[in-house]
Image (spheres, helix red, strand yellow):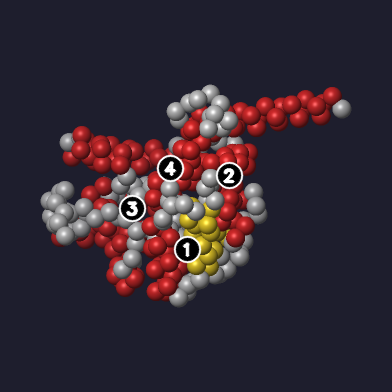
Amino acid sequence: MKKRKAIRGHFSIREQAYRLWVAGEFKTQFEKNIAQIPDVYSLSLSGGIDSLQVLYALLDAGKPPTECITFKMQSIESPDLDASIEVCKKLGLKLNTVIIPDDAQTIYDDSVEIIKIIENPLKTHVQCTYPHKYMIPAMCTKHLVAGTWSGYFLTAEKKVNIQRGKLAPDKFKKWYYDFRKAEWEKPGHSFESIKKYVHSFGITYWEPYLDDELMNLSLKLDFYDWNCDVDGTFKHKYLQYMMYKDWFDKIGIWRRQASMQVVTGIRELHEQLLADPKMNVRNKKDLRAVYGDILNDINAKKRLTNQSNLLY
């Protein structure tokens, strides 16, 4: 295997001690949040570092999941599913796998139902909520635990790496701090749509990363602190790995970091809607326009209903 190139210098003893101290404080607060989760729950498991960190914290707390639940789009092979199967097999956990039909008409009809509830046409909101339409009815509990919020403040996604390549180190450090703080503070995250959708079915949604103290701790460290090993070599979410190193090393499985919509095929399959003139009535090239037309149609029907009710 080709050795990865260091993206910063070696961490000094003091630097390494400080970031491990922050990671320890982060873990302590994270586990306080984990302790609030009821004993009977379903865990949304993708096999990525975030959901595995949640799982390992729950196991350390003596709260194994009643079931792990994951999904697969019918026609797409899923690294999420492969990783989840292996993890559950090694740990002897129940895995509930939901297979989601993915023909264009079903996706369109499902999107209408989802948008009617979340009232938001943004792609990330619709597509991140999408699998819950099938997961919720399949659950055997009334509590869903997930690790979706981590990406908003421990992110190492594509847009961050683009800026890292453009900016001088000091400017990038400030940009990264400001970016994470803004992401945390701005309203209208896709998490809110997922939560709204899940709650509409009487299910309680638990997100242990959603915590101001965790955000404040995360801002004490920069991109390199969170995502580099002691030699300065890039290792995605290195400090999260270090928090539960024994578990990660023991199980030895997590899927490569990638957008959920991409790795599961949801984004690709939803693009089918653009090719059908009955679904893409304005012949737009962006799915947001299709979702927006769906929401506009829903709102127009609501107005007609309200006007009819006033007449009678």
Three-letter code for the amino acid on which mark 1 is drawn: Ile
3 or 2: tag closer to the N-terminus: 2
Spatial distance from mark 1 to mark 3, Cα to Cα? 23 Å
Q: Residue furthest right?
A: 312
Q: Nearer the viewer, mark 3 or mark 2?
A: 2
- Quarter of the picture containing the C terminus is top right
Badge 4 element: helix
Q: Label 2, secondary structure: give it.
A: helix
Return the residue at label 1: 34
Number of the front mark, 3 or 4: 4
Classify mark 4: residues with Cα within 10 Å, few (<14), some (14-19) or many (20+): few
Q: Are marks 4 and 1 in contact (CB under 8 Å)?
A: no
Mark 3 or mark 4: which comes first in sequence? Answer: 3
Judging depth in this view, the residue of 203 and 224 nearest the camera is: 203
Q: CA distance from mark 4 to mark 1?
A: 34 Å
Instruction: Quote the CA–CA distance across marks 3 and 4.
Output: 18 Å
Mark 1 or mark 2: whose residue is earlier in sequence? 1
Q: Which mark is residue 106?
A: 2
Please name the residue that numbered disc 4 is placed on.
268
How far apart are the two marked residues, 1 and 2, measured between alpha carbons? 36 Å
Measuring 71% from the left and 27% from the top, which residue is drawn there?
Answer: 303
**Amino acid carrying mark 3 in the image:** Gln
> Could you tell which of marks 4 and 1 lies nearer the N-terminus?
1
**Residue identified by numbered label 3:** 257
